Image: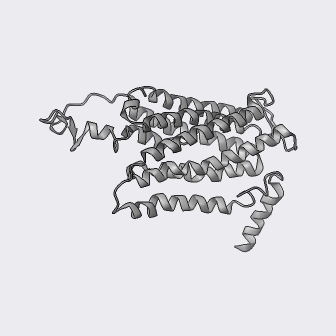
Amino acid sequence: MTQVLSAVQGVFDKYGDERTKDWFLMSSPLPTALICLSYVYVVKSLGPRLMANRKPMELRNVLIIYNLFQVLFSSWLFYEIGMSGWLTGRYNYRCEPVDYSNDPATERMVHACWWYYFSKFTEFMDTIFFVLRKKDRNISTLHVIHHGVMPMSVWFGVKFTPGGHSTFFGLLNTFVHIIMYTYYLLAALGPQVQKYLWWKKYLTSLQMVQFVAIMLHAFQLLFIDCDYPKAFVWWIGMHAVMFFFLFKEFYNQSYVKPPKQKVSADSKPAANGASKSNGYSKQSDYYINGNGLSRSDLVHRATAGAH
């Protein structure tokens, strides 16, 4: 096993980018892998067990601060990635090989890539807040897998290709995160604000458009000659395909009306005027802990990510 690990580390040292090899968490994939595994253990096992006999935490002010931080952080990342190439005319949208020079603008992009990698750790808090608020039903396996693998996935990009064609993914993703976390920030302010958040449906549509754009941008390199690793083309492109269908399924469940069904006795209005289904009132289903977040908001958050 030691020899295998040594050989793998030799590959990283030989082919990894010289500019990032000594940066925090970049010398080896093991620290990132351990952090990701620890995250999965905490949110799927340790956290729920520790909260089992405790009351759910409200965390309204914490959520407001967290979402505000994510809006500012995503805005800064979008600016850095954009001004390092995509929004200045330096990068070609059809083919952009990785620049391994020490040009100041290039190094700016390399740093932006590392901070984008770091942002995948801050997004762990989305799930941790679910645990602390005992919203275990929102901690789906797919949600945990997505958040758990993204730091590892981005690590390889920063290690081998910190710049170039695939950073278009980061540009679009940070832009969508600005809008997404702004929505969650406003929703966390309470019912008095949430009534104005009619545009959630269009946020989901924007996320799907993002993944289509990433697919087209990545897979075009399969048909044109470009000095960019095909492995990363497939990696980025297939991520976009998977998340497109994930969000499409969420969109259909949330916004496409199902066929009309015969009203059963269980779904008839109760005597007090509250509509009930299986014992849960629609109002209690809509507001969670009084913070104005609907169940569909939380399901959306459980699937969001792409980042």
Q: Is residue 145 left or right of residue 196?
A: right
Determine whether 186 is above or below 22 in the image: above
Point out the residue furthest to the bottom here.
Answer: 2
Q: Is residue 260 left or right of residue 85?
A: left
Q: Residue at x 37, y 31 (%)?
A: 192
The percent coordinates of residue 193 (x first, y second) are 41, 30
Residue 209 location, quadrant:
top right
| Residue 14 % position (x, y) | 83, 58
Is residue 168 rendered to the left or right of residue 21?
left
**Residue 53: quarter of image:** bottom left
**Closest to the observer: 67 or 165?**
67
Residue 43 lies, in percent from the top left, at 47, 57
Q: Is residue 131 above or below residue 272?
A: below
- Given residues 243 and 168, the one toward you in this image is 168
**Quick one: which residue is furthest to the front in this view?**
61
Measuring 42% from the left and 26% from the top, which residue is drawn there? 198
User: Where residue 168 sits in the image (x, y, percent)?
Assistant: 69, 35
Is residue 306 visible to the viewer in this orientation of the structure?
A: no
The vertical placement of 124 against 251, above or below, is below
Residue that protrudes farthest toward the left in the picture: 271
Residue at (17, 39) in percent of width and height: 266
Q: Which of 58 and 259 lies nearest the eye of the viewer?
A: 58
Q: How is the image coloured?
A: one colour
Image side of residue 272 versus residue 147, left or right:
left
Residue 36, placed above or below residue 231 = below
Quarter of the image with the N terminus is bottom right
